Image (cartoon, rainbow, N blue to C red):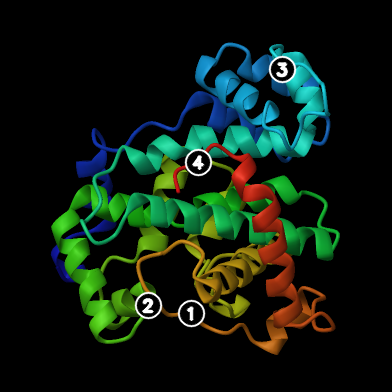
Amino acid sequence: MSREEITYEQVIGKLEEKLPSLPQILDELIKALGNFDVTLDLIQEMIEIDQSISLEILKVVNKVEFLEPEESRITSIHDAMHKLGFENVQKIILNVSALPIFTDTTFPAFFKVESLWKHSVGVAFGCTVISDLIDYENSDKAYACGLMHDIGKVAKIKFDQRNFGRELLSAKRKEMSIHEMEVARNLLQHETLGSMIAEKWEMPEELTQAIRWHHTEEREKRIGLEDPDIHFLVDMVFLSNCLINKMQFGNSGHEFHSTPSPKLLRRLGLKDIGLAELEEQVRLLLEEKFSFLVLLK
C-alpha cells in the first residue's frame, strides 16, 4: 500500500471504532507525571476505584522480593503502595493500564504481541536508566514515552494486519528496519501515525513528540519541534530504543538496530560512560525490575 493511496487521516478515521479509548486512569496518570505536587496519596485516590489496577498492585507487593521474612500478606492498597514506593506504583499503573491497547489487537502469526510489549517495556526501563544517569528530573515521564513509543505499529496492525505483515517480511528480507522500509517505499510511517493517535487522545506534547521523532536522531530534522526540553526527552527515547533493539529484548518487528552517534551521547552528557556501560546498566535494571511487573512474556 503506497503512501499516495491512503492518508493518515483516513487510517485514523477507519480506526475510530477499532482503537481502544485511552483508559481514564492512564490518561490521568500520564498528565499528572509532569506535576511535581502529585503525591502517593493522590495516586491512591486515582486507583482505588479501579479494581484491576488494585489487584495487580497487591499481586506485586506480595511477591517474595518485597515481603520481609515472616511478614504477613499485604491486603490494603494503602499499605501496598507505601511498601512499593512512588516509582514502582506509577510503573505498575502505566504498564497494566497500557497493556490492553496492545493485547486487544490481533497480531500477525509470526509477530507476537508479547514481543512488542516486552520491547516497549524495555525501552521504558532504558529511559529510566538514562534519566538516572543524567539526573533528569522526571524519569516517570521518560518511562511513559518509552512505553508508548511504538503505538503506531499497533495501529497499523489494527488497520490492516495482513498488509503490515507483508511490510515486516519485506523489511526482514531486505535486512532493513521497519522505519527504513516505510521511508524507502513511501509507506505510512508508524511514528507519524502513533503521534497523531496520541494527539487524538489529547496526550501531553512531550509524549506526542517523543512518539513522532523516536527514529530521528538529528534535532534539525524534527520539523516543528523547538522546545529544547522535549528534544532532550526525544533523545532519551531514541537512545533507549537503539539499546533495546541491540540487546534483542523483546522484538519491535525487525532484527536490526542503529548505533547512536557520539554527538547524541555528548548532548545527553553520556560521552564518558559509553554504550557498553550504558547497555550493562540497562540490562541490570531489566533483570531486577521486569519480573516485578505483572506482564505478558
Tell me, yes or no, whether the two marked residues, 2 and 1, touch with CB atoms within 8 Å. yes
| Residue 292 percent across, percent down from the top left | 64, 41
| Residue 4 percent across, percent down from the top left | 17, 69
Q: Name the residue under label 2.
A: 177
Q: Which of marks 1 and 3 is nearer the N terminus?
A: 3
Q: Name the residue under label 3.
A: 73
Q: Is residue 169 above or below residue 26?
A: below
Residue occupying image coordinates x 75% and y 39%: 87
Q: Name the residue under label 1.
A: 257
Residue occupying image coordinates x 47% and y 28%: 23
| Residue 105 percent across, percent down from the top left | 28, 43
Q: Mark 4 points at which residue?
A: 295
Tell me how far mark 1 sits from mark 3, CA to CA: 43 Å
Mark 4 or mark 2, which is nearer to you? Answer: 4
Toward the viewer: 12 or 95? 95
| Residue 90 percent across, percent down from the top left | 68, 35
Tell me how far mark 3 sits from mark 2, CA to CA: 46 Å
Tell me, yes or no, whether the two marked residues, 3 and 2, touch with CB atoms within 8 Å. no
Q: As drawn, which residue projects farthest toward the front?
A: 70
* Residue type (three-letter) at the residue carrying disc 1: His
Tell me, yes or no, whether the two marked residues, 4 and 2, touch with CB atoms within 8 Å. no
* Residue type (three-letter) at the residue carrying disc 3: Arg
Q: In this view, does 95 lie above or below 60?
A: below
Toward the viewer: 68 or 37? 68
Describe residue 7's horizontal placement relative to residue 178 as left or right: left
What is the crowding at mark 4: few (fewer than 14 residues within 10 Å), some, or many (at least 20)? some
